[in-house]
Image: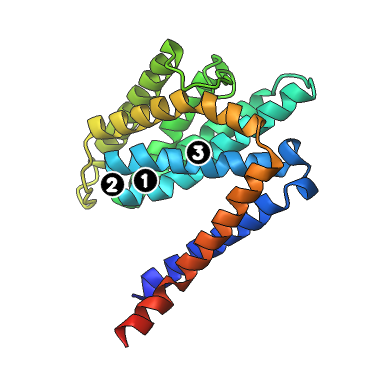
């Protein structure tokens, strides 16, 4: 019960804070301010949580979706600002940082359902792989589209397949390298499951992201105010949930 109480208070506080941000839309410069980035991050967190939780379990899904949503939301926000302000293309260090960040998030998520040593072996392998794909122009920002509809794109399928194969192979290589230590017991997760989950999650989000970007670019103050009020109310109800349980039991 203590864990549920902590999760309820944490989740309720987060939703309440987000509700306050949405209600302060004008003060935060509208769609050109940080609120657009927050909106993207929260939306992509929810989107990533669906395929990741279905593929490798709720623990992996919840841990990984936070990091992946943060990285992708920030990446798209910066790309949107860059296009609006007509800035120069991104530098190579940005590509390495974003690719390595995605690899770190996925490594930590796999560590949560296997062992900490998996992250130590998996992270450098997958970071190099993702950084290379970013340099080749296959980063999410390079393939960012804006559309009123959900899009099925062959490039999204190809890039997702590539990411899935890279993730599955990196995990398999990490498992083989780690298996050389006889004292190390490793909870096994199928490389196929890892590859399909990460590749499938990438394709799922990649198909919906054009609509998300269209929606964020056209958010109005009134809609955000409604979302803010809803978040604040839901956050309050979540925080109050443990107290209601205690009162009803008595």
1 vs 3, front mark = 3
Q: Which residue is mark 3?
A: 44
Where residue 85 sits in the image (x, y, percent)?
A: 80, 24
Please tell me the numbered disc located at residue 57: 2
Q: Residues within 10 Å of mark 3 (few under 14, many from 20)?
A: many
Note whether residue 33 is visible. Answer: yes
2 vs 3, front mark = 3
Q: Quadrant of residue 53?
A: top left
Q: Name which residue lies at 35% across and 47% down.
A: 60
Circles 1 and 3 in contact, beta carbons < 8 Å: no
Where residue 11 sits in the image (x, y, percent)?
A: 49, 61
Q: Quadrant of residue 90?
A: top right
Q: Secondary structure at mark 2?
A: loop
Note whether residue 115 is visible. Answer: no
Does label 2 or label 3 sit earlier along the sequence?
3
Hey, which residue is sitting farthest top in the picture?
154
Q: Marks 2 and 1, Cα distance to the nearest angstrom? A: 6 Å
Q: Secondary structure at mark 3?
A: helix
Circles 2 and 1 in contact, beta carbons < 8 Å: yes
Where residue 72 sits in the image (x, y, percent)?
A: 55, 34
Does label 1 or label 3 sit earlier along the sequence?
3
* In-front residue for pair 9/172: 9
Q: Which residue is mark 1?
A: 61
Where residue 151 sits in the image (x, y, percent)?
A: 46, 18
Q: Marks 2 and 3, Cα distance to the nearest angstrom? A: 18 Å
Q: Marks 1 and 3, Cα distance to the nearest angstrom? A: 12 Å
């Amino acid at each position: 019960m203590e864990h549920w109480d902590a999760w309820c208070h944490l989740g309720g506080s987060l939703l309440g804070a987000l509700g306050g941000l949405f209600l302060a839309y004008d003060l935060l410069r509208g769609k050109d301010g940080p609120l657009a980035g927050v909106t993207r991050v929260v939306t992509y967190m929810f989107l990533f949580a669906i395929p990741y939780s279905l593929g490798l379990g709720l623990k992996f899904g919840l841990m990984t979706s936070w990091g992946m949503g943060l990285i992708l939301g920030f990446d798209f926000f910066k790309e949107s600002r860059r296009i609006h302000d007509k800035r120069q293309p991104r530098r190579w260090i940005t590509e390495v940082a974003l690719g390595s960040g995605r690899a770190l998030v996925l490594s930590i998520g796999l560590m949560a359902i296997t062992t900490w040593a998996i992250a130590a072996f998996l992270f450098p392998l997958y970071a190099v792989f993702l950084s290379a794909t970013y340099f080749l122009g296959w980063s999410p920002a390079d393939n960012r589209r804006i559309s009123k509809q959900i899009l099925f794109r062959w490039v999204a399928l190809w890039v997702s397949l590539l990411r899935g194969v890279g993730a599955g192979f990196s995990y398999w290589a990490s498992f083989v390298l780690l298996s050389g230590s006889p004292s190390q017991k490793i909870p096994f997760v199928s490389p196929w499951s890892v590859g399909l989950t990460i590749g499938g999650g990438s394709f799922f989000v990649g198909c919906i992201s054009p609509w998300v970007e269209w929606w964020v670019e056209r958010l109005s103050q009134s809609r955000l105010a409604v979302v803010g009020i809803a978040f604040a109310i839901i956050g309050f109800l979540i925080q109050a949930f443990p107290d209601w349980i205690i009162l009803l039991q008595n």
